[in-house]
Amino acid sequence: MSAEFALIERYFAQLGNGYPAVVLGIGDDAAVVQPPDGQELTMSTDTLLAGVHFPHAAPPELLAWRALQVNLSDLAAMGAEPLAFTLALSLPAIDDQWLRPFAAGLAACAKNSGIPLVGGDTTSGSLAITITVLGSVPRGQALTRAGARAGDGIYVDGTLGDGAAALHLLTQGSLQDSPALQQRFYQPEVNLPLGVALRSLAHAAIDVSDGLLADLGHVLSASSVGAELQLTALPVSEASRAAASNLAQSQLWSLTGGDDYRLCFTMPPEHEQQLSEQGYELNRIGTVSTEPGIRLYEGAVEKPLPERTGYEHFGHQ
Amino acid sequence: MSAEFALIERYFAQLGNGYPAVVLGIGDDAAVVQPPDGQELTMSTDTLLAGVHFPHAAPPELLAWRALQVNLSDLAAMGAEPLAFTLALSLPAIDDQWLRPFAAGLAACAKNSGIPLVGGDTTSGSLAITITVLGSVPRGQALTRAGARAGDGIYVDGTLGDGAAALHLLTQGSLQDSPALQQRFYQPEVNLPLGVALRSLAHAAIDVSDGLLADLGHVLSASSVGAELQLTALPVSEASRAAASNLAQSQLWSLTGGDDYRLCFTMPPEHEQQLSEQGYELNRIGTVSTEPGIRLYEGAVEKPLPERTGYEHFGHQ
């Protein structure tokens, strides 16, 4: 409709400007994008709903970051480079006070990763943000969940459990008191260059969105292998420790909490040095084994796995 | 989350099977798709919300058709061929009685146009369907809204106003009494082969989603031209005539009603014969002129334009 059309044009049209790959941006029936020669495309979509994935009063600028970063995280886990994205935005009202900072946050986040916005749809409804990202990867080089081999080290590229810690503070209404966790929740880092570097080094990769045990479990199932994890090797942030009542809670968050958007990957340990020398943060948390399932150790002592390996959104019933 | 993952797998995973372009379908962080060599990509997204774009009680099988067809309509208007699509589905509950026919309808519609489903996200919220379609078109051959030239004929590929007529019956609770209009509302035809044929013949194209005057207006603005339309040349269906209280209402629907998803395009009239011989339905409704704006004629008599050229969704406030 005309009002929607004008809305998109006004707030978002410039987010596709200045990219040579964008042959035709927002404003026609569809965008036209030039993919790099000889590449395959990666495509993924994620929705964030108010009251489910974030509070209704979430700061729009930060929310925009989160909506795009969680999608870029899927591209990173494939070893893909960003090509273009679309935005489907449902809003209770056309509110300049909300749209202006949302568009500014989206522009900053998109620029940060060099991905143009090429299309969108705005509808009148409860607040919902669906982003679809398109990436590219050289033919046959996409990183998948299958391929992990016994003997591979299991790595994550940063601390785990911050998403769950932030959620804990959010439900208590005190997230704003922890700038570190607020940033981790709304502006999770996504290491696209690491994903690219891993194409030729890692055997399998996934992004930790639903919790380490759940997501690593997908890798292990797809690869028909198992894993041994070292509890004390799980990287936990100071902010998460401060938010938790004790170490055990931080560790539980790092095992089962969602919304971390870290890369988790398996590779032969001999590649560690190469990546470290390139400046990438690597935390080895365990080893791939032939025996199916995940076993958790503290030193040589096997520890029980948490009963709930899954994930709870903000507002999840 | 695991429940969502299992949900998508169960109902939708097979919708990506059997397509050579799908290197990796649903089930990883992102899908991997092989685009045809030497082509540009077209990308578009559209959301349908319950209570806004369709009634909450809409038949799920038909709704799935509608959600995909309105997106394919954007590809047709670019002259693109379908490559892949993603589905973001928000649902009040995981309801097998709803999901089974929805998935069946989506499978049938996707198969009908030969487009694989390669990714998705399901969330718990009010019913909303966002589809993002990816298409391909030979480099530089995408049909845009710009390019219409004075002297071009203005064409549509079928009747206009059926969407508005269906909406009229829908708000009266009697859409089911008109199978023809019910089909036009939920299963609008999308002529992808005509879009492809128009690449080398048409100067500009758009799909009629917001109403002829509004959408043709976009073409004329983008092309810096105007148009003269012949009121009696507007193709109106028998079903629309039957639903309308008089001819004037049918004509108003055909000028301003949304949800028709017809192709509207401009091209030199000498191409008419070629397209007709290929079996495409062509209805010439007017002529592109140098003078900006749209002028409406009945024979030689100029008629006033309707005051409202825009579009009203079902449930629009």
Image: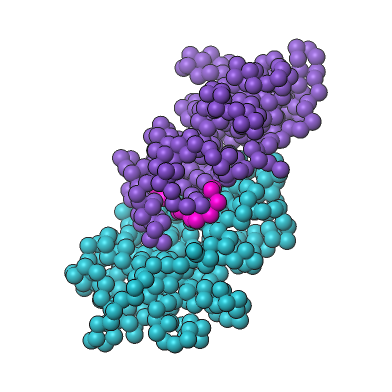
Chain colours: A cyan, B purple
Q: Residue B296, position in %: x, y? A: 76, 21
Left or right placement of residue A245 versus residue A290 in this view:
right
Q: Residue B20, position in %: x, y? A: 31, 41
**Quarter of the figure with residue A49:** bottom right
Say if A139 sits above or below B185 in the image: below
Q: Residue B284, position in %: x, y? A: 63, 18
Number of disc labels: 0
**Measuring 75% from the left and 14% from the top, which residue is drawn there?**
B298
Magenta stretch, main secondary structure class: strand
**Measuring 54% from the left and 48% from the top, which residue is drawn there?**
B128
**Measuring 71% from the left and 53% from the top, which residue is drawn there?**
A94
Please name whichever residue, A132 or B60, is drawn nearer the observer in this view of the structure: B60
Left or right placement of residue B4 versus residue A66 in this view:
left
**Measuring 56% from the left and 69% from the top, which residue is drawn there?**
A186
Q: Is residue B122 magenta?
A: yes
Q: Is residue A284 magenta?
A: no
Left or right placement of residue B234 versus residue A257 in this view:
right
Left or right placement of residue B287 versus residue B114 in this view:
right
Which quadrant, please, contains the C terminus of chain B?
A: top right
Q: What range of the chain is rendered magenta?
A: B118-128
Residue A109 shows up from this direction? no
Which quadrant, please, contains the N terminus of chain B?
A: bottom left
Q: Residue B126, position in %: x, y? A: 55, 51
